[in-house]
Image (cartoon, grey):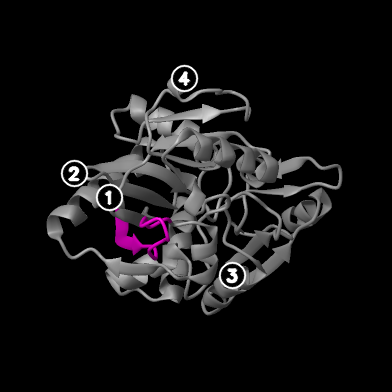
Amino acid sequence: MKIEIITTPNEKLKETGFGLLKACENVLEALQQSYDVKLNVCKDKNDLDNIIDRKPDLIVLAVKYIVSDRGKNIWLADFFENKNVNFTGSINSVLHFDSNKESAKAFLKNKGIKTADYFTITSQYSYNHEDGLPIKFPLFLKPLGSANGNGIDEKSLVKDFNSFKNKVKSIFDTFDQTTLVEKYLEGREFTVAIIENRKKQNLFIAPIEIIPPLMNNGSRILGEKVKQENSEKLKSIIDTKTKSKVETLATEVFKLLNIRDFGRIDIKMDGEGECYFMEVNLVPGMAKGSSYFPRAFEIAQKIDYDSVVKMMIESSINRK
């Protein structure tokens, strides 16, 4: 079987993906033990056409899109689906829930899934006074479409209107993106890695708890700096009741969004221990030793990195 991994020069890519080239090389090394595998760093449509000409049996999408020389995004799931080539992960209409956090929250809320109350801000001048805010403080602010904790820091948690305005301005100045404003949930934080076993028609589920370091303001915030420094703690969920609640919510989200092959669902508790959906990552980071998706399986299920990678593509292979 011939497999080709596709990534792109992605140091400035705001979308989620396996990570930098080193992470893609980790995936390559894991698959080379069992398959004929090639890693491609694609820069334009010609690179994609060359892959089509080689007629691979499976494409592993390490990113969601590449940027053409004209500055246009080429969405890879659509590209290979139109070419009738088998690829890993969800189709593009589902990947939209990864790219746009608001759309995922709205869709799931309509299906009865609990998510933190939220609103969005399309201009830093949208609100001039605290009385106009749809949700009361404390609030949590982040860029709507960024990944990897970008734009999230200690100042994301705001408790007064002046801090609110400053953080909104910072997001627009830095990212030029819509701001997602959520009711702050002060409880525990979890992520759940899921791999679909198409042959057995079930799901491999690996829930873990994430404990960010304590900030100067007394909160624990999982932001860009924390993720870059790997200063957060990842641990198994010991309490069976909590583990069951987290797994049940993640499984419902996976099925309702019609996620294919694999995905990672982020969940947070409020102060009363109620679980809420936060966001979904459908092209999860795959850096060996640090990324949450493979680490979740290592911690919760005692499954090593190479086995996780192979499990991720088995669903795609069985689909074909």
Label 4 residue SS: helix
Label 1 residue SS: loop
The image's mark for residue 132 is 4
Q: CA distance from mark 3 to mark 1?
A: 31 Å
Q: What residue type is disc 3 on? A: Ala
Residue corresponding to mark 2: 272
Label 2 residue SS: loop
**In the picture shown, does residue 87 fall above or below 211?**
above
The image's mark for residue 23 is 3
The span shown in magenta is: 203-221
Tell me if mark 1 has few (under 14), some (14-19) or many (20+) residues whose alpha carbon lies within 10 angstroms of its own: some
Looking at the image, residue 255 sits to the left or right of residue 68; the answer is: left
Along the line of sight, which residue is nearer the eye, 295 or 222? 222
Residue drawn at 32 percent across, 54 percent down: 189
Front tag of 4 and 3: 4
Q: CA distance from mark 4 to mark 1?
A: 27 Å
Tell me if mark 4 has few (under 14), some (14-19) or many (20+) residues whose alpha carbon lies within 10 angstroms of its own: few
**Which residue ends up furthest to the right in the rendered image?**
70
Q: Is 208 within the magenta?
A: yes
The image's mark for residue 187 is 1
Looking at the image, residue 190 sits to the left or right of residue 287; the answer is: left
Q: Residue 186 appears at what percent x and percent y?
A: 30, 47
Q: Earlier in the sequence, mark 4 or mark 1?
A: 4
Instruction: Say whether residue 223 is visible.
Output: yes
Q: What residue type is disc 1 on? A: Gly
Looking at the image, residue 158 sits to the left or right of residue 283; the answer is: left
Along the line of sight, which residue is nearer the eye, 41 or 192? 192
Q: Residue 138 appears at what percent x and percent y?
A: 37, 38
Q: CA distance from mark 2 to mark 3?
A: 38 Å
Tell whether label 2 touches label 1 (CB within 8 Å): yes
